[in-house]
Amino acid sequence: MSRTSASGGGAPSRRTITAQLFPSEATTPWSDLSSKQRRAVLRQEESLYTWKISRSTDAIYASKCESTVYVTPSLDPHPCSECDALYSIHKFQVAINRPMPDETNMKYVPKAYRCPELGEIYLKYKGVRELVEKDDGRSPWLKFAQRVINGDFKSETLLGMVEALVIKSDRLRKGKGLQNMKYSSTFTNFCNLLASTSTRAYQTFRRHFGGQVMSNIRFVVCPLSFL
Ligand SMILES: [Zn+2]
């Protein structure tokens, strides 16, 4: 599922469908077909899919899926016979065993074979495809992003630290210095506390994540010093 942004597979090739629908255009390159002809081919292709990809349920179904299977309550439901039969289709085997192209080569996937909505998001935000699809959506970075959006991470220090790291790397990438960088107040308090505990520890931390220069640190009475 992560190798393609198409919504299904197993249909005859677009060239074959074009030849069936528009015999006079049988050898016309895809890009030279009119938008009306291309739309007709894509609709026909979708109607001929042998399998359909459901991203919302993270599953692939046979187009002729029986929808219902009968099992005893103690057993996990098995796929219906139509879905199960997909494994015996050569085209399906080829599709599921095709190696994953890497992020840099993915942009060469012909536009016609991409889901336009997903494709637009992927094109607009470089790296999003890899983030979303890496390890079939199980990458810790995707989980992190989802939990930030869900508000699961309550630590403003952690988020301030990540934010500082991102802003710092952005600035360095653009050849800018780190002067006048704004930090969240929670992150600044954390930096003050860390620097008050150990200036060397803070300087090491700052090299990696950013933070106020030492001259801007407000030294605080560190709770750790009472231990
Ligand atoms: Zn089924």
Image (cartoon, rainbow, N blue to C red):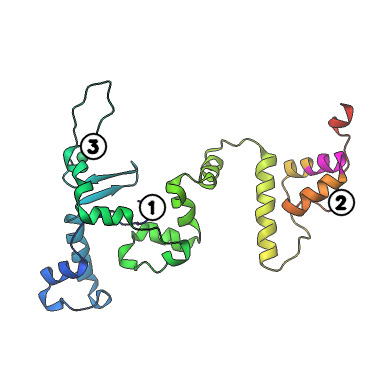
What is the x, y in percent for residue 10? Answer: 21, 56
- Magenta-highlighted residues: 191-198
Question: Could you tell me which residue is drawn at 65 percent across and 54 percent down?
Answer: 166
Q: Mark 1 falls on what kind of element? A: loop
Give the CA distance from mark 1 to mark 3: 21 Å
Q: Tally the marks.
A: 3
What residue is disc 2 on?
Answer: 214
What is the x, y in percent for residue 101? Answer: 41, 61
Which is more toward the observer, 59 or 179? 59
Question: Could you tell me which residue is drawn at 11 percent across and 78 percent down?
Answer: 24
Q: Is residue 149 above or below residue 214?
A: above
- Residue 44 visible in the shown view: yes
N-terminal-most mark, 2 or 1 = 1
Q: Residues within 10 Å of mark 2 (few under 14, many from 20)?
A: some
Q: Mark 2 falls on what kind of element? A: helix
Which is more toward the observer, 156 or 209? 209
Q: Main secondary structure of the magenta part?
A: helix
User: CB of mark 2 within 8 Å of CB of mark 1?
Assistant: no
N-terminal-most mark, 3 or 2 = 3
Amino acid type indicated by mark 1: Ser
What residue is disc 3 on?
Answer: 79
Q: Residues within 10 Å of mark 1 (few under 14, many from 20)?
A: some
Q: Nearer the viewer, mark 2 or mark 1?
A: 1
User: CB of mark 3 within 8 Å of CB of mark 2?
Assistant: no
Question: Could you tell me which residue is drawn at 50 percent across and 60 percent down?
Answer: 125
Q: Is residue 196 a member of the stretch shown in magenta?
A: yes
The response on whether ligand 1 sits within 8 Å of label 3 is: yes
